[in-house]
Image (cartoon, rainbow, N blue to C red):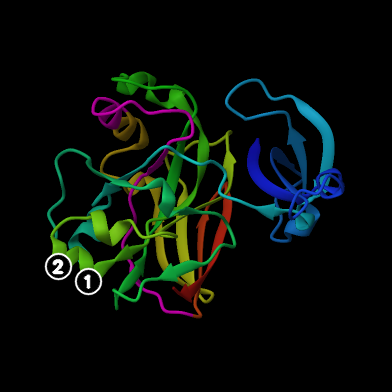
């Protein structure tokens, strides 16, 4: 099941004087996988997806709605150096335990939204990743049971001001700018994260090409480790690390992160 959060014109809201006459929904994306999203439709659900799914009966072609970030997380947990080749390309050691950091909820954007380059950085990099969405509260969970706390998976991009990361010797400023966490296009709930392909393309040219089996610490381990530190809430997002091949983006670029079995997350790059 592919769960999306989206914006759609709402004639009733417009008649009532609401501006701009739109409403935000969650829904289930229906139709066979296709590079042409116009062949898909989205069926609205009642309320949120963190429980039984009840359909409202409303349905629209996917091309008639605007996809938003699939959730608004209370926090985004990211894992650094979780692929050995990526750690080596930046001159870092492979960590013995998951090396986690936080990105603020204000960094989250959806499919089609622009990554905005801050004037304070001259070297912003893409980092395509598998994203995990938590489905129920998790605190100190066992690794053997960790995947049962997952609602589903999506594509993510841990955008990074690399020059600031080097200057600060930590991750907070470099990873936290508004728009530095593209995430989507939807949440795939029927998905095995053990061994799938992740690619990142810039302007149609593949720059990263890896598989999740190359993770040093797998999804279950990362969830268990993170939940021992902080309570994970429904809708929280975990970015599981990036394969080798990260590199710079500039205004005018288009970045596409594609996860096999989920779909493509596409974001233009703009100056702030």
Answer above or below: position of 25 versus 258: above
Which of 78/262 is in front? 78
Whether label 2 touches label 1, CB < 8 Å: yes
Element type where label 1 sits in the image: helix
Assess disc 2: are there few (<14), some (14-19) or many (≥20) residues with their C-alpha within 10 Å of its C-alpha: few
Answer above or below: position of 19 versus 220: below
Quadrant occupied by the C terminus: bottom left
Which of 45/213 is in front? 45
Residue 241 among magenta residues: yes
Quadrant occupied by the N terminus: top right
Residue 90 seen by the camera = no
From the top left corner, tell me how far across and down residue 43 is, in percent.
78, 38
Residue drawn 83% across and 41% down?
Answer: 59
From the top left corner, tell me how far across and down residue 23 is, in percent.
73, 45
From the top left corner, tell me how far across and down residue 226 is, in percent.
28, 32
From the top left corner, tell me how far across and down residue 110 is, in percent.
55, 54
Residue drawn 51% across and 80% down?
Answer: 252
Number of callouts:
2
Residue drawn 87% across and 48% down?
Answer: 15
Give the residue number, with chain letter if any, for mark 1.
163
Q: Quadrant of residue 138?
A: top left
In this rendering, would 178 be left or right of 59? left
In this rendering, would 149 be left or right of 21? left
Residue drawn 76% across and 37% down?
Answer: 44
Magenta span: chief secondary structure = loop
Q: Which residues are magenta?
A: 224-251
Point out which mark residue 167 bears: 2
In this rendering, would 123 be left or right of 180? left
Residue 196 seen by the camera = yes
Residue furthest front in the image: 17
**Marks 2 and 1, Cα distance to the nearest angstrom?**
6 Å
């Amino acid at each position: 099941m592919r769960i999306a959060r989206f914006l759609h014109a709402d004639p009733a809201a417009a008649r009532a004087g609401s501006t701009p006459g739109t409403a935000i929904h969650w829904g289930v994306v229906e139709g066979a996988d296709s590079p042409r999203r116009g062949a898909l439709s989205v069926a609205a659900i009642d309320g949120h997806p963190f429980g039984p799914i009840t359909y409202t009966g409303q349905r629209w072609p996917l091309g008639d709605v605007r996809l938003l970030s699939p959730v608004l997380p209370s926090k985004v947990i990211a894992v650094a150096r979780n692929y050995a080749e990526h750690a080596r390309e930046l001159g870092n050691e492979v960590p013995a335990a998951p090396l986690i950091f936080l990105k603020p909820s204000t960094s989250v954007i959806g499919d089609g939204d622009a990554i905005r380059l801050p004037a304070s950085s001259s070297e912003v990099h893409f980092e395509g990743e598998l994203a995990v969405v938590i489905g129920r509260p998790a605190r100190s969970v066992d690794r053997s049971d960790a995947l049962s706390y997952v609602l589903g998976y999506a594509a993510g991009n841990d955008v990074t001001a690399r020059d600031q990361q080097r200057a600060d010797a930590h991750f907070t400023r470099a990873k936290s700018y508004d728009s530095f966490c593209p995430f989507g296009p939807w949440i795939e709930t029927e998905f095995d994260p053990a061994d799938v392909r992740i690619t990142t393309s810039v302007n149609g040219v593949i720059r990263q090409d890896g598989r999740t089996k190359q993770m040093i610490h797998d999804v279950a381990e990362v969830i268990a480790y993170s939940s021992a530190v902080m309570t994970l809430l429904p809708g929280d997002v975990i970015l599981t690390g990036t394969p080798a091949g990260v590199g710079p983006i500039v205004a005018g670029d288009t970045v596409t992160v594609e996860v096999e079995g989920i779909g493509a997350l596409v974001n233009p790059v703009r100056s702030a």
